[in-house]
Image (cartoon, rainbow, N blue to C red):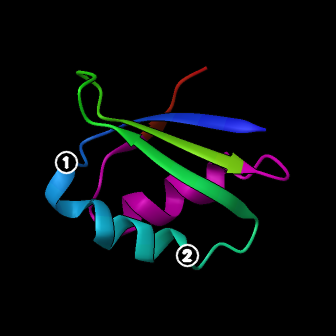
């Protein structure tokens, strides 16, 4: 399953955000699209953990909203 989020994350924060997301063991892969105006975050997961991802990144000061 691939979850897609609109964020305010930019290239210079990618490594930091990847380290934050490493705490969620259900994530298989993380990909960013910084050329998109919404700074897209794509996360491959084994089950839907969109609320956990949003909560975690928002608590760290990032804007993160799932795109449906």
Looking at the rendering, the stretch of residues picked out in magenta corresponds to 45-64
Can residue 40 be found in the magenta stretch? no
Q: Which of the image's four quarters has the C terminus? A: top right
Dot 2 or dot 1: first in sequence order is 1
Q: Quick check: 15 above or below 57?
A: below
Circle 1 SS class: loop
Q: Where does the image place residue 31, in percent across and percent down from the top left?
A: 48, 46
- Which secondary structure, mark 2? loop
Q: Position of residue 45 (x, y in %)?
A: 75, 51
Distance in Å between CA atoms under marks 2 and 1: 18 Å
Image vertical order of residue 41 relative to residue 45, above or below: above
Left-right relation of 61 to 17: left
- Classify the position of the N terminus by image quarter: top right
Q: Residue at x 31, y 69 (%)?
A: 15
Neighbours of disc 1 within 10 Å: few (<14), some (14-19), many (20+): some
The answer to which image quadrant residue 34 occupies is top left
What residue sits 29% from the left and 55% below the top? 62
Q: Mark 2 and 1 residues: CB-CB less than 8 Å, in contact?
A: no
- Relative depth, front residue between 19 and 50: 19
Give the residue pinned by disc 1: 10
Tell me how many marks there are: 2
Q: Which of the 4 image quadrants contains residue 36?
A: top left
Q: Position of residue 16 (x, y in %)?
A: 30, 72
Disc marking residue 39:
none
Q: Is residue 35 above or below residue 28?
A: above
Q: Residue 19 in the image: state x and y as whole percent.
A: 42, 77
Q: Which residue is mark 2?
A: 22
């Amino acid at each position: 399953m691939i979850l897609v989020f609109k964020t305010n994350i930019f290239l210079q924060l990618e490594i930091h955000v990847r380290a934050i997301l490493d705490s969620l063991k259900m994530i298989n892969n993380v990909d960013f699209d910084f050329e998109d105006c919404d700074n897209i975050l794509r996360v491959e997961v084994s089950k839907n953990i969109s609320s956990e991802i949003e909560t975690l990144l928002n608590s760290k000061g990032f804007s993160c909203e799932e795109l449906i």
